[in-house]
Amino acid sequence: MDVSAGSRRERQKEDTRAAIIDAFLELSHDANTVAISVPAVADRASVSVRTVYRYFATKDELQTAAANLFNDRVTRQLRSTITPANFAEYLLELWSEFERETLAVLAEHATPTGRRLRATRLSGSRRTVRDAIGDTADDETVDLIIAVTSSSMYLELVDRMGHSPERAVAMVERAVRLLLADTAEPQEPGERL
């Protein structure tokens, strides 16, 4: 077998798989993922229903691939590690990837698989934030920093409210500075701020 023919075939398989996932993500932008049919995905991807099932045995596998796509693409694209000195640059780099992958971010937030994926990343996110800020903050502050720098906040500030990623990063940077400046004991529910 010709090596270049084999690599072309592999590349074509990867392209077909990506086209199916992208079609699912495009459809998920306009409809609940439960309502998306495999024939609709096949039509959008310009492949047969049989081809979709060749790549994804079930619709759940397709949803899982779509949810994982965001994580895989963003992880490959990020080049830096978060530190206090480069926080804004890191967040802008991360949120720029979110902007390029907004449909995948939305799919991750709309599917049970995506929610599970975000939950599995939580301990790593806590370590990353802890490494970046040291032991200067309590666990609740670390979790708040994760929340305000998350894809959920990106969706809220950029996708829903219409801020540019740059403006949203500046807003989040301010929130993180305020969180880190507040070294008071966590307040009980109902206490006045």
Image (cartoon, grey):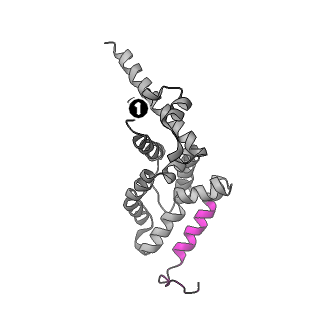
Does residue 137 appear in the picture of this structure? no
Q: Residue 96: x percent and y percent? A: 57, 48
Pick whichever, 24 or 103, lies toward us.
24
Q: Residue 173: x percent and y percent? A: 58, 64
Pick whichever, 76 or 63, lies toward us.
63
Q: Residue furthest bottom?
A: 191
Does residue 83 appear in the picture of this structure? yes
Amino acid type of the residue that numbered disc 1 sits on in the rendered structure: Tyr
Give the residue number, with chain letter if any, for mark 1: 53
Q: Quadrant of the N terminus?
A: top left
Instruction: Name above or below for residue 105 compared with residue 148.
Output: above
Q: Quadrant of the C terminus?
A: bottom right
Q: Residue 2: x percent and y percent? A: 34, 12
Instruction: Name above or below for residue 12 compared with residue 172.
Output: above
Does the magenta-highlighted stretch encompass residue 187? yes
Left or right of 126 on screen, residue 33: right
Taking the spot 54% from the left edge, 58% from the top edge, the residue there is 152
Instruction: Name above or below for residue 16 compared with residue 114.
Output: above
Instruction: Name above or below for residue 14 compared with residue 112.
Output: above
Within 10 Å of disc 1 (Cα), the crowding (few <14, some 14-19, many 20+) is some
Report the magenta residues as a range: 170-193
Mark 1 secondary-structure assignment: helix
Taking the spot 48% from the left edge, 33% from the top edge, the residue there is 20
When asked about the image quadrant of residue 14, the answer is top left
Q: Residue 127: x percent and y percent? A: 38, 62
Pick whichever, 97 or 14, lies toward us.
14
Left or right of 192 on screen, residue 2: left
